Structures are given as C-alpha cells and as structure tokens.
Amino acid sequence: MADTPKPDELAKIDHTPPVFRGWMDTQPEIRPGIACYGSKSKDLKYVDMPNPRDWSPFDDDWKLPENWEETIHEGFKDRLGRFRSFKLFMDICVRCGACADKCHFFIGSGDPKNMPVMRAELLRSIYRKKFTVGGKLLGRLAGARELTEDALKELWYYLYQCTECRRCSLFCPYGIDMAEITIMGRELTNLVGLNIDWIAAPVANCYRTGNHLGIQPHAYKDMLDFFTDEIEDITGLRMEQDLNRKGAEILFITPSGDVFADPGTFTCMGYMMLFHYLKSLGLDITWSTYASEGGNFGYFTSHEMAKRLNAKMYAEAKRLGVKWILGGECGHMWRVLNQYMDTFNGPADFLEEPVSPITGTRFENAKTTKMTHIIEFTADLIKNNKLKLDPSRNDNLKVTFHDSCNPARGMGILEEPRYVIKNVCNNFYEMPPSTIREQTFCCGSGAGLNAGENMELRMRGGLPRANAVKFVHEKHDVNMLACICAIDRAVLPNLMEYWVPEVDVTGVHEMVANALVFEGEKKRTTDLRGEPLPGMEDEEDV
Amino acid sequence: MPSVEFEGNTYNVDEDGFIDDFNNWNKDWVRHVKTTEGIEEMTDEHWKVINVLQDYYKKNGIAPMVRILSKVTGFKLKYIYELFPSGPGKGACKMAGLPKPTGCV
C-alpha cells in the first residue's frame, strides 16, 4: 500500500494544464495511491463476469482477452442502441468547460483529465472514431482516436477516479449526466474484466450472503444482539429486534456497514432504539438477514449486476408478506431505488403505498417503489409530535451536515435531515451554500472508491468537503459532521482525521437516539458511544 | 497472486500482504507479520487478540466488528493500536490470517 503524502504536501496543487502537448499525446502514469487494485479472479467467477484472472493495473500486461477490441466495440454499439441518454450525452457536449472546476477530483488533484469534460472526452473520442462520420473521416481533427490498449488503460484509470456524484452535471448547461457516462464506461471495461477489487469483492459477497461484507444470518443476529446488550447498559431497557418475521407490516433494510463498522454501528443502535420506542405506538417492523444490504456495489459494475443484487429486496418483502419497506441511512441505495428499481425488479404491485402507522402520513413519493427513506419517516414523526426528545443530551456537539450526493442531488432529500437534526440537537451550523444541498461536495470515496490502497486519491477528492468543514470548525467550533450515508460514515472519519482532526462523524439516527426520552429508562450518563453526557462528566464510571 | 517465503513456508498473499486462505495460516505466519508490523515481542495480550479473532472467524466467517473485539478482549481500541500499530484490521487480522473486510467499511 502506497504511503499517503502529508496534508501540507498534498495541499500544494497545480491547476495549470500542460501548454505544449495535447491531451491525446499524454499518457498517464498509473500511480499507486491513486489507482485501486484489480479485481480478483475468484470474485468475478462467483458472479460469472467476463475474463476472470488475477491482474494488477501496475503491471504492463493487464491480461486482456484476445478479442477485447471487438468486445468493447460491440458493447458500445449495444449500449448506444439501448440507452438514448447515452447516445445523446456522447453527441451534445460543446466543451464549454462549465463543469471543469466543479469536480472534487480536479480541485484536489489538478490533473486536467479529471475535469469532467475531459474524462468524458476519453470515451467520446473513441465513440467518434467508431460511430461518427466526421470522426471516421477526419480522425484527430474531429477529436477522434483509435481504441488502443493505452487508450483503454487511460480510460480505466480515470473512470475509477469519478465517484458518480453528479456535481458537475448540476452546472452543465445541457444537463449531461456525467455519472451515466462513467456508469457506461465502467460497464464497457467490465466486459473485458477490468474492474477493481474493492467493488468486485463486495459484489461477490452480496450475491452469496445478501450483503457486501459477507455476514451470514447467525452473525447478523449476533451483531444485533451485541447492540441490544450495549443499549441495555446505557438505558436499562432491553430493546430486542425482530429478524425475518413473517407477517410484519414493514421490512427494514439498511447498509451492512451499519451493523459492522464504526461509527455506523451507533447509527444502527439509533434505528433499534427508535423502533423500540415506536413499538407501543403501533410500529410492526422486522429486519432481514437475507435482504441485509441497502447498498449496491453492483451499480458500480453494470445495470445488470445492480438488478441482480437488488432483487433480494422485493423477494424478501414478498416472502415475509410485508406491506412496504423502510430503508436506512444510505446514499447510492437511494439512487438505485429512486431511478431504477421500478424497472429493474418492479413493479412491486404486491406491496402497498407506504403509510406511517404512527402518524397516518402517506409517503406519496414512494408510490411506485414502496420504499421510504428513514429520514423522511423520522422527520414526519417529529413533525407530528410523536417523539419525546431532549436535545440537550447532544449539547456537547456542534453539528454540521454533509449532504450525501445521491439522496441530495439524486432525489432531493434536503430539508428532512436538517429538520431532524435541529430537533435533536441545539447547535447546528451550515457549511457555505456552494458546498451543501444540491451543490454538495462529494466525500471523495463513493461509487466503490472507498478502498485503502487509493488513500491519496480519496484525500485529494475529499479536500473540498473537508475544507468546508474546516471553515465551520474554525468559525463555529463545529466538532461533529453528520451524514445519512454508510459510505460517508466509513470514509469521512479518515478524511477528517487527515484534514480536520478535531471533527468526528455521526449518522443522524445516532443523535436521534441520544435525544430520545424513554419511559422507564434509567438516568442516562453516557451517549451511545459511552462518552459522558453534558454535565455528567464527573459521573463517568472509569 | 504474489507469494511470501518464510522459514520454509510459502504463503499466497494479496497486494496488502493478507494470506489468501485462512486454512493456510500457521504460527510461523505470525512471526513473519510480527517483523513487518514492527512488533518487538509477542505477548499474551497479542495472542489473546489473535485467538479472539480466529475463534470468531471460525464461527462466523468474517472478522468481528471492532467493538466486539474490544469487549471480548477487554482492550480499548487505543490499546489494540498499541499492540498492533497498523490497527485491528490491517495489523491484527492480517496476523491472524483473516481476510480484509470490504464494502461500506
């Protein structure tokens, strides 16, 4: 694993493009710290993906199949025919450059090929040569080039330096969905076996066990039992959860990171406590050890793989006979659901339009998918005055909120998390407007790039987000960065430790559970993390 | 897949030096990782962490979450970092022969 440069070294970024050489004449050096490891043979075999073999992007020989050019050409042609959006996005860019400085990877690296327009050009140039008259006749003059092995390697290198966050698309006068270009590009590289280990391994795990981590049913139960004990230590109340219970009204599906990795585990305890609180008010909910993953790394591979992995959600809902599905704090899960699930695995006509059993609110935005985000569900509970909350329990926190790209830009969840946070804690400060809501800066590690070996890339890509956090830390003494995405919870702690070490990371439902006042609970002295509550510092049992 | 030769053993490893299969683990592997991890002397506390990891892995097929490791061993996370400078995942799991966790972690 490559050493990551120190922050002051990494912050020296040069944004001047090379003057004398055109982009077609510069071949990138595929660098450790930036590129991820290649996918493993066993993982590709597990899901019948093409060209399974062990390979390394740092070797000269990528062990491509013999007919790789033909495969990519055919795959390209097929997708241009199937996706009109893709064909349109290949043709309509006028290279105005509005997107160039909007990308967190370009801002953090200064590499001109990380300008979204340029990253797309890597693919468009190949498109022009093969599929346009101008490109065929005029070649370079028309911005066209041959698909050589070097061109393919370069394409792979930059496709895995895009987190599909779509910040650039927001500023594109044509509304070109850059994530879709990356998605299509990644589909093409997958046809010849070029993926990354950090995506391929979770995909294989998810197909085998239902979740990215490979948690088997008994281990899943073991983890929830552990949290139940922990919650009992803090509150004195036993908050057992139901697993795989047939006949429940609602199925709950959350990213597996929440049951395994800190600080997501505290968010998970938050869900458990909320569900227990609502039980007496009429909540009838079950978890599943099969539909045990909200996220979908298949989405970073191909549409087909995303569809295969998401199928378990409706299959399990049907098996258990629930009415609708509640989803946890996850990011890309919601883009897949909101944009594709209906045609992937739907129609979910055996389910009902989600209605909160506590408030009676009908979640009309989930009319077709029958799946509601927990932040909407909780915001509605608070709005209807169904939760007894003591926000002073979070008084040690000065909180800011990171909008996760997919829920924010992908489906407009902007107000709900803020509304919940403001009701469960007293100190909330926004980062600058150009870095939040629709304009939010990516965590720098989404779309399957949250590996360990590409830490330099992640710290570069996360720089704009970290910089905005640093601003509110210095101005308002902010010490907690809240988010509603499991990748965020996994990667923002690294990012904060690197750029703004005074700031920690939390899911919103961890703060909800801290503030939630239960009847019959013992006097709380610590928060969910075991840290003393404000004013209880002297009572800490060391 | 690269391999590592150590005291007459051959281990297949991934890019980060994790062995490819838990079944290929033996005590010599611990001595190998000890040198690369910069651990001076293996103590009972190191072995306690390794044993807990391996027992959990045999039962569940994955590494325990850090909080379970901490609770079962009675060692705070900070202390586990003192024992294994690369941390519970990259240090202790590697030494115990467990694979790297993947996904949103």
Image (cartoon, rainbow, N blue to C red):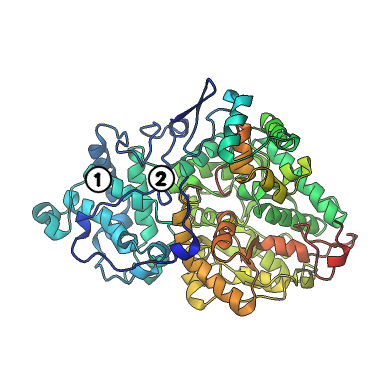
Of A331 and A538, nearer the camera is A538
Q: Chain of mark 2?
A: A
Mark 1 vs 2, N-terminal side: 1
Asked whether the beta carbons under mark 1 and mark 2 sit within 8 Å of each other, the answer is: no
Q: Which residue is mark 1?
A: A150
Image quadrant assignment for residue A108: bottom left
In what element is the residue under mark 2? loop
Of A346 and A449, nearer the camera is A449
- Image spot of residue A412 (x, y percent): 52, 67
- Image spot of residue A298 (x, y percent): 47, 44
Of A43 and A4, nearer the camera is A4
Q: Which mark is residue A302?
A: 2
Q: The residue under label 1 is which amino acid type?
A: Asp
Of A42 and B93, nearer the camera is B93
The quadrant of the picture occupied by the C terminus of chain A is: bottom right
Give the CA distance from mark 1 to mark 2: 23 Å
Inspect this view and state whether residue A216 appears: yes
Residue placed furthest toward the bottom: A475
Residue placed furthest toward the left: A137
Select label 1 or label 2 by which is in front: 1
Is A290 left, or right, of A109 in this rendering? right
Inspect this view and state whether residue A247 appears: no
In what element is the residue under mark 1? helix
Residue placed furthest toward the front: B40
Q: The residue under label 2 is which amino acid type?
A: Ser
> Residue at 70% of width from left, 34% of height from top?
B56
- Image spot of residue A159 (x, y percent): 36, 52
Q: Chain of mark 1?
A: A
> Residue at 51% of width from left, 61% of height from top?
A443
